[in-house]
Amino acid sequence: MKRKNIYFYLLIICGFLNFGLISCTDYLDKSPSAGLSQEDVFKSFNTYQGFIEDAYDCMADPMNTASSSLFNFGDDILQPRAEFLGSINSDYRRWEQSPECIFYSNLSGDLAVPSKFLSNPFSGSQGGYGDGTSTVSYWDGGWLGIRKVNIALENLDKMTIPYKSAPLQEQKDLIQGQALFLRGYLHFHIIRVWGGMPYITKAFTPTDNLKLTRLSYAASSDSIEKDLLLAADKLPVSWDATETGKISEGTNEGRFTKGAAYALLGKVMLYAGSPLMNGASNGPGGYVYNKDYCKKAVRYFWEVIKLSTLGGGSTYDLLPWANYSENFYAFVGKIPASGKEGILNTRMIAHQRSHQIGDMLTSMGGWGIGCGPLENYVQYFGMNDGTNFNPNIYNTPTIDPWANRDPRFYKNIVCDRQTLMKTKPVATPAQFFLGGRDCGAGGKSETGYGWQKYRDSTIWVSGGTYNWSNSLNRRLPVIRLADVYLMYAEAVNEAYGANVDPSTVDAALADCHIKAWQAVKAVRGRVLNPDGTPLPLPSSLYSSDNAMRETIRRERAVELAFEGHRWYDLRRWYVSDQPEYMKLDVLDFDKDHTYFKVRSYGKKVFEKKHFWMPLLDAQVQIFEGFNQNPGW
């Protein structure tokens, strides 16, 4: 049988090639065309770091796919064109051939064509769209990156030349910590989509036995945990505080840190302890939370929170409300910077300018995909008094259903009559009413809403200082502090309870004094109402563990809206196939707002088999033991 595009092939391919590299760092002495040998690469820290940083580029970034923000395919955004990620019919098999797909190889990208690596396998230029953006996928990019870091780890003893007199052992620790972190990270992004996999800890040669059977999800997660624990021990809280980091002080943002390692550890354990993963691993109780994994998640998240203002530290903090959008976009040549809120991001190879038009309405110059937030998702955005939204308001058309909402509503949702985008000479108000310019099929919105997480109404369709085509740069955070607070709250609630101080019940958490509801309150406390008061958290929302669970899930829907988390959350909670989360509701209303009607656009397809993506058939027919996922 042909072994084309199977991950084992990608694990082998680099073994036959000479090394080439580039790096984004400004302190590397060697140029990409220097023709370094393998011995040269691993002898000194500066070239070794370049090799590691090239492996960073194997971290898939959904924001860099061909049509931009089409990574929101839970119950959040309606994407009527099925070929764009099968958002309605869950046609995952179509995704295998889609250049918009972040999971498998993009057919336009170098990672889908191994022969393109023959000239420069570590070039970092893995895009196929002419603008430097990466089209690396979780599957092929993940296995390739794992091979790269395994090569790095196997050659660590060859490093004998420190860089600019910084301690050699410190530099070895930094290399080892980054490699271990990345090995765990890439395995995690594979298993959370396809389930348990072999854990690859060596760079294979053609003579090795490649018949590796799949591990359970729990066993895969345990292996990731071991790598990340050692990575956390080797990585610094701040690169600028190390002798090596001082050489490039001020330009170290984005490199893996101790906080990032613990944040990822917590996430890996929370996923392992979530109902889908626990059930798939034949864990206790079946498809319910595994308390032991949740307790581990609490411990690891607490290591991050201790570095934050909530835990008494100063390394991490939530951005002030006035700067909230800096997590997601910036103007005129600036890179979006999360400041102290950012814990882990993929490296920005290029600014995301052109690809943003993929999700814009035709009236904004978009490509005609016609993305719009679904009404059932918009209803997760509550009121500015902290209470949940009551859809009965639609029965009283004299009341504005979009007034007095959670302030995050206006950061994410564009509703009728709000400005979509500036045009000359006046702003362009949205027309989402039936018969309006922006309502309907063919590149318009069919839901009654638009969305704006990664842009706002100050950008211009054309001309003007802030022209979207040449000024807006976007970033999709991987892990930010608000996410850590909410994951910590979930883990505490499931392991101990909503109103339990972990330090009183777990000797391993003697200094962990933040309750689940307090972490949620911290996230809401950053959000300011127009009068300057913080968004409250009414006690009724955490009066019981079940109430807290529902509040956390709503809060994740709102705080992390359109950041690519929703599909994963619904799956790991094992609720994606429940009617509540399969709804595709839209809102109909007239120009004068004399009536509002929630209408079902249809029903999302989600069967049991959709909890895990299918492996390519060619990859599961190589040998017995490497099994296809159930139902595929």
Image (cartoon, helix red, strand yellow):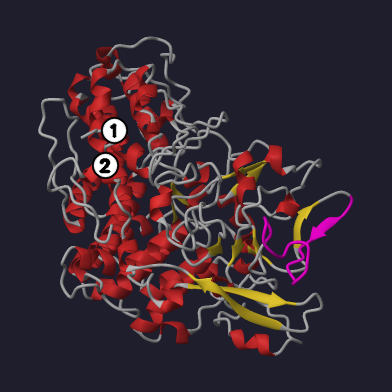
Is residue 428 shown in magenta? Answer: yes
Disc marking residue 549:
none
Residue 523 versus residue 355 in the image, above or below: below
Q: Is residue 440 left or right of residue 572?
A: right
What residue sits 22% from the left and 66% below the top?
Answer: 278
Disc marking residue 4:
1
x, y percent for residue 554? 47, 73
Residue 616 versus residue 28 in the image, above or below: below
Mark 2, other Cα within 10 Å: few <14 / some 14–19 / many ≥20: few
Residue lying at the far top of the rendered structure: 35
Q: Is residue 599 left or right of residue 168?
A: right
The quarter of the image holding the C terminus is bottom left
Marks 2,1: beta carbons within 8 A: yes
Name the residue type under label 1. Lys
Structural distance between the alpha carbons of marks 2 and 1: 8 Å
Q: Which structural element holds mark 1?
A: loop
The range drawn in magenta is 425-444
Locate residue 406: give its quadrant. bottom right
- Which residue does the numbered mark 2 point to in the structure image? 618
Locate residue 527: give its quadrant. bottom right
x, y percent for residue 576? 38, 70
- Label whose residue precedes the other's in the sequence (2 or 1): 1
Q: Is residue 630 left or right of residue 309?
A: left
